[in-house]
Amino acid sequence: METGIVIKPAVWIYKEDKKEAADEIFMGWAVGILEECEGWMHIVTHYGYRGWLRQGTVCRLNPEELCRRDEMKQTLFVSRAFADVLDRPDVRGQILCTLSRGAFLTGACGIKDGYQRVRLPDGREGYVPALSCKRRKDSDGYLYSGEPEGYFLRKPEDRNFSEETLRDKIIFCAKSYLGTQYRWAGKSAEGIDCSGLAFMSYLMNGIIIYRDAKLQDGFPVKKISMEQQIKPGDLLYFPGHVALYLGDMKYIHATGHENNFGCAVNSLSKKDWNYRKDLAESLLMAGSVF
């Protein structure tokens, strides 16, 4: 199977009918190319999601290039909602493209005047504010060589924080999307859906969970007791919907409901002003990676 790297800031993955969007992926993400047909590529993502991309949205990489990229260990990811890539390290520079949180870049030549020089997957070079990106602490080999052990992307030696800290980091990431509009299949601060919010909140903290709003065998989220075990950062599952538990009966989610239509905080408790009766009465189960 050939491997390709996304060269557009954001790309939609479509379902079999090639009309309905199923997922969104970002620049620098790798995909396995399964087949090509009439201007489309049938692909599989590094987290096992399959669908169709338009040709021209990814470039192929040969095995030697994959190994070289993996050995460079200079991969950065955009950690803020958006980051402009400029043609020079200056606020007046021309914008080459704008990247969303989670996009991958290759760092080059360090930081100058508060800007990080970067190389894009299509070969262009530019500058991003150094504060808008972070260096990955793990190898990117998982993108090309199968499933990472336990779906944790970080190397064991880099997991030097407590469970409580990791839960806090997951919630912090989820809250960074507050106010983002709802967008079916979206995973960015331009628009995000319920499972996209959960997926990105975990991915940005080194854990791959299933992309859709359900438990799936082979992924790290397991069913837990709602009454006794649930803690902040765990997941709440409803019919066709998923949310992240915040504690004190509250949860954060991306919803298309007319009263929110976006990333918002709601409650399972009738005493709270943001109580959602429809969701509280349809809660199916809770899940956790811990």
Image (cartoon, helix red, strand yellow):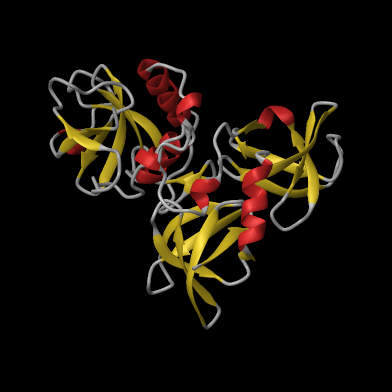
Left or right of 121? Residue 239 is: left
**Residue placed most toward the observer, 239 or 6:** 6
Q: Position of residue 39 (x, y in %)?
A: 55, 79
Q: Is residue 109 above or below residue 228?
A: below
Residue that appears at 49% across and 63% down: 32
Quarter of the rendering containing residue 77: top right
As drawn, which residue projects farthest toward the bottom?
Answer: 38
Q: Position of residue 247 (x, y in %)?
A: 28, 19
Residue that appears at 65% across and 39% down: 73
Can residue 22 be spotted in the picture?
yes
**Residue placed most toward the observer, 166 or 83:** 166
Residue that appears at 47% across and 29% down: 173
**Residue placed most toward the observer, 28 or 271:** 28
Left or right of 200? Residue 213 is: left
Q: Is residue 228 above or below residue 148?
A: above
Quarter of the rendering containing residue 284: top left
Q: Where is residue 85 in the image (x, y as percent from the top left)?
A: 75, 44
Q: Position of residue 183 (x, y in %)?
A: 44, 50
Q: Quadrant of the C terminus?
A: top left
Can residue 283 be spotted in the picture?
no
Quarter of the rendering containing residue 244: top left
Q: Is residue 129 above or below residue 71?
A: above
